[in-house]
Image (tube, rainbow, N blue to C red):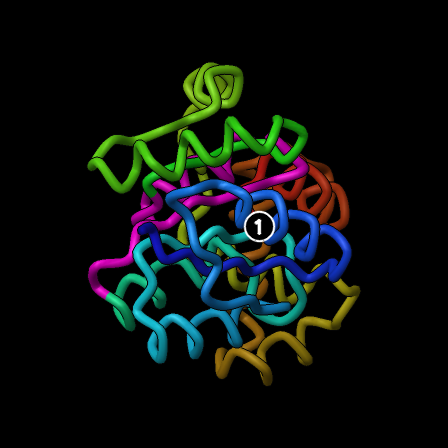
Amino acid sequence: MIRLMLAEDQGMVRGALATLLGLEDDIEVVGQAADGAAAVALAAELAPDVAVLDVEMPGMDGLTAAPKITEAAPGCRIVILTTFGRPGYLRRAMEGGASAFLVKDGPAQELAAAIRRVVAGERVIDPALAAAALSAGPNPLSPRERDVLAAGADGSTVADIAGRLHLSEGTVRNYLSAAISKVGARNRIEAVHTARAQGWL
C-alpha cells in the first residue's frame, strides 16, 4: 500500500483529490495539509511514501516545501502539481528533489499512475512542460537577486527591502539593477512580472 500525503490550499480540490486517489486499491491517503509549512510538519510526523504538493500555496509554497519534506522524511518521494506550467517551476522542482512534475488538469488516473511510477524509482515530467523548460533555458537570477526581487514585488522601498533582508541599501540597489538587467526589463515591476511568468520567482 502506498502511503500518500496531499498538500493543497483549496479545500475542495484537496478533498476531491483525496477521494479520487483513495479509490485506488494500492493508495492510502494518510494526511492532508493546506500549506507548505503544515506539509513539512505532517511529513515529519507521518513519513509518507509520497507527498503530492501544489506549487501555489500561502506562506510556504510547494517548491520551497519539497526539499524540507525530503529532509524531514528522507524516504518520501515528491510529486509537484501545478496549475501554471511555468518553465522555471520545473527547474526549481527538480533542483528541490521532486520526482514528478504534472499539471493539474490531467485525469486522476494519470496522477495515480505517476505516483506508482515514482515509488518504483522513476521520474515523471509532463512532456509539454519539459519542452518549455528546455527552450526557456536556466534561471538567469542568482538566489540573492531572486530574494531581493521577491522582497520588492509588493512595491516595498529599497530601505524596506534592506531592513527585511539585513542588507545595505546600496547592495539592494545593485541586486535590483542586476535582476532588472538580466531579465531584460525596464524597471522593477516589469522584472517581477517577467520573472513570475517564467517561474523564476
| Helix, strand or loop for disc 1 | loop
Residue at screen point 41% across, 19% down: 134
Quick check: 191 above or below 134?
below
Q: Which residues are magenta?
A: 74-98
Residue 4 horizontal/vertical position (percent):
42, 56
Residue 20 vs residue 25, the one in the foreground: 25
Quick check: 28 above or below 141?
below
Q: Please give the residue where the numbered disc 1 appears in the rendered image.
A: 55
Residue 185 horizontal/vertical position (percent):
68, 36
Total labels: the figure holds: 1
Within 10 Å of disc 1 (Cα), the crowding (few <14, some 14-19, many 20+) is many
Quick check: 199 above or below 162?
above
Residue 90 vs residue 197, the one in the foreground: 90
Horizontal side, residue 182 vs residue 185: left or right: left
Residue at screen point 55% across, 66% down: 32
Residue 103 horizontal/vertical position (percent):
59, 32
Residue 146 horizontal/vertical position (percent):
51, 55
Residue 172 vs residue 133, the one in the foreground: 133
Residue 92 in the magenta stretch? The answer is yes
Horizontal side, residue 148 vs residue 119: left or right: right
Q: Give the amino acid at mark 1.
A: Val
Residue at screen point 52% across, 16% down: 128
